[in-house]
Amino acid sequence: MQSCASEPLVPEAQYRHKKFDIHKKSSPPPSPIGISTADDAKTHGESVMNESLQDKRKKRLCESKDSNQISLETYVKVKEKLDQELSSCDELPMPALKRFRKCSLSSKAVINPPTIEEETLKKICEHQERMKRKFPSKERSAKEQERRNKNTESCRITRKMTKLKQIVIEEEYKTDYEENMKIKEKLTRTYTYLNVLLRLKNGDRDVLETIPKE
């Protein structure tokens, strides 16, 4: 009886359909690892240092503004915006009667815009340091601080323009009130004069004694 040596059994390759390999994702090729040299590290460090210096410089400029400088900048911008609005006469408020007159009168008629004294304008644009609100300090980047400064400045200009428009309305009210009083006084004198003429026409001579002699 012949003995046969045991041979290792090699498993047969099993058939696998290609649909089972659809969901397999091919791994991306490994990216080459860049080796930073000493010069690259030095350049990167200098750029970071320059950015930090610029951020500090911008913050220092924002914090170093005093009340006089803020008042002057506000005055210049409010003055410029006021001139634009007075030239167009669209933004500044105008009473309904004046709007009607402006539309109904001929093109030759000119509606004079309200005049605002320089002292009044400077007083409105004056920055009060004691009115400044205090908030807890917060670390911000240069862009965030610049955006915040622009928003603060825009809100400041809006408040000044609102106050300025309120003063314009009050001045127009005073002017219109004085004009109305003059018109009423003139109408009263005209009606009195007409009444006296009618009584004289009817033969009432006693009315002559009521007329003051100058």
Image: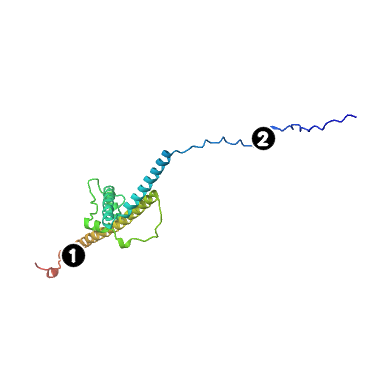
Task: Report whether 195 appears left or right of 54.
Answer: left
Query: Where is 158 relative to 39, above or below?
Result: below
Crowding near the residue tagged with mark 2, few <14, some 14–19, many ≥20 C-alpha atoms within 10 Å: few
Q: Which residue is mark 2?
A: 21
Query: Where is 189 relative to 19, above or below?
Result: below
Judge by depth and name the residue closer to the eye, 115 or 125: 125
In the rendering, at what x and y percent does residue 182 appear? 20, 61
In the rendering, at what x and y percent does residue 30 appear? 55, 36
**Foreground disc of the pair 2, 1:** 2
- Which residue type does callout 1 highlight? Thr
Task: Identify the residue at horizontal 40%, vertical 44% (top origin).
Answer: 45
- The image quarter containing residue 181 is bottom left
Q: Is residue 53 visible?
A: yes
Quadrant of the drawing holding the C terminus: bottom left
Circles 2 and 1 in contact, beta carbons < 8 Å: no
Q: Which is nearer the N-term, disc 2 or disc 1?
A: 2
Judge by depth and name the residue closer to the eye, 153 or 210: 153
Q: Which mark is residue 116?
A: none
Query: Disc 2 on helix, strand or loop?
Result: helix
Task: Identify the residue at horizontal 31%, vertical 63% (top origin).
Answer: 130
In the rendering, at what x and y percent does residue 109 appear? 23, 48
Q: Which residue is mark 1?
A: 192
Quadrant of the drawing holding the N terminus: top right
Task: Identify the residue at horizontal 35%, vertical 50% (top origin).
Answer: 56
Q: Is residue 117 visible?
A: no
In the rendering, at what x and y percent does residue 134 appear? 36, 61
Judge by depth and name the residue closer to the eye, 15 or 48: 48
Query: Where is 39 relative to 186, above or below?
Result: above
Judge by depth and name the residue closer to the eye, 203 or 89: 89
Query: Disc 1 on helix, strand or loop?
Result: helix
